[in-house]
Image: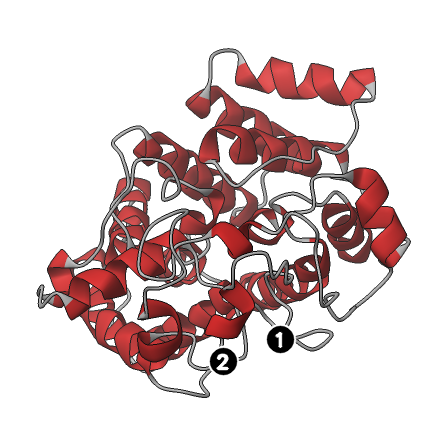
Amino acid sequence: MPVTDSMKSIIKSCIKGLYVFDAVASPAHWFYDRNALRSTYGKIEGYVKPTEKMRGSIMSLSNTGGAGRGSDEGNIVGDVILHDKKKYWGRGADFHYHVTLSAGENTLEGSLVRVLVRTLASSSSSNNANISQDLNTFRSNYVDFMTTPGTHNDSYASTCHRMFFANKMKGLKLEDCPDNDNHNVDSMDALTLTIPVILKQFANANNTDEDICNSALSTIKITRNVSHEFERYCNAFTTLLLNVLRGDDLRDSVKIAANLTFQNGGNIIENMVKRGDDDPMVACYIDSGFPAMLFMLYKYADNDMATIALANANAGGENVARG
């Protein structure tokens, strides 16, 4: 279908919304105690600077040389990426994951979306045949961005990034650096970078939905390897976004995406909302994070974006990638 001025406005709003939801959510990111979240911030009602300390921060247990939890003796964090930020990863330090961000400043994942947007905006290609060229360019831009001091101000990088650059330092070719620790990589933040690619390919009527789904998955694989199981979440998310861009009813689109990811998913999401279940405080893993996103979309479908952004932030857990 032709891309109208109205659709162009929606596409711009989608990108703006991504940056807004990311920045609003980051102070409450990975809080799993509602009382601790409320005592720290009260109720988040706008952009807030993340607190300095966060009791139970997993960053204090995370591997500074690669995947998941581990020693803080590795120097991927500090020397290769996240320059001068290693001090926040010390054992028992309990710093907030985004302690270095100002109020309204984007996390690393939000900043990487900007890198990809700039990459795509500088290219005239929008069909599936040429998107691989753009993604190759993005791979180089990603490496330059991550390894150049001062390009962003976040203090946290997820397992996939630490594994990528650990492999790079071992001498692997860039295309061989994406990795998976079979625990922390199949996570909600993997979907974030797909959004600009989906939007750009949607703007070209020659691309089929299958083309766009494949391009979304290829985008994810620039920075991480994901399991075969993850692919259905990527396809469901792409389908959801495409249906909404076409003007389909949001709740109907959510139910379709839910049915693509788990049996009778649409009815389950609908019934959870009707029961009045609390907004979910869930971890980053895709199996819990994706249904939580669908729940929030279904519940707040009639609300304005500000209301949804604040509800998502105040729910805590993996609210950044969900946003």
Place of residue 146 in the rendered image (x, y in percent of width and height, measured from the top left): 35, 76
What residue type is disc 2 on?
His
Q: Is residue 291 above or below residue 131?
A: above
Name which of mark 1 and mark 2 comes first in the sequence. Answer: 1
Please report the residue visible at 44 percent of the width from the left and 24 percent of the height from the top. Answer: 261
Note whether residue 185 is visible. Answer: yes
Place of residue 275 in the rendered image (x, y in percent of width and height, measured from the top left): 81, 15
Query: On the rendered structure, is 118 left or right of 26?
Result: left
Please report the residue visible at 40 percent of the width from the left and 42 percent of the height from the top. Answer: 184
The foreground one among 145 and 210 is 145
Q: Is residue 242 above or below residue 197?
A: above
Report if the CB atoms under discs 1 and 2 are less than 8 Å apart: no
Note whether residue 4 is visible. Answer: no
Tell me the SS state at disc 1.
loop
Please report the residue visible at 53 percent of the width from the left and 11 percent of the height from the top. Answer: 264
Colouring convention used in this rendered image of the protein: secondary structure
Q: Residues within 10 Å of mark 1 (few under 14, many from 20)?
A: many
The foreground one among 125 and 227 is 227
The foreground one among 311 and 90 is 90
Which residue bears the numbered disc 1? 100
Query: On the rendered structure, is 299 left or right of 76?
Result: right
Q: Is residue 119 above or below residue 203?
A: below
What residue type is disc 1 on?
Thr
Place of residue 221 in the rendered image (x, y in percent of width and height, measured from the top left): 25, 52
Please report the residue visible at 28 percent of the width from the left and 56 percent of the height from the top. Answer: 163
Query: On the rendered structure, is 288 left or right of 204?
Result: right
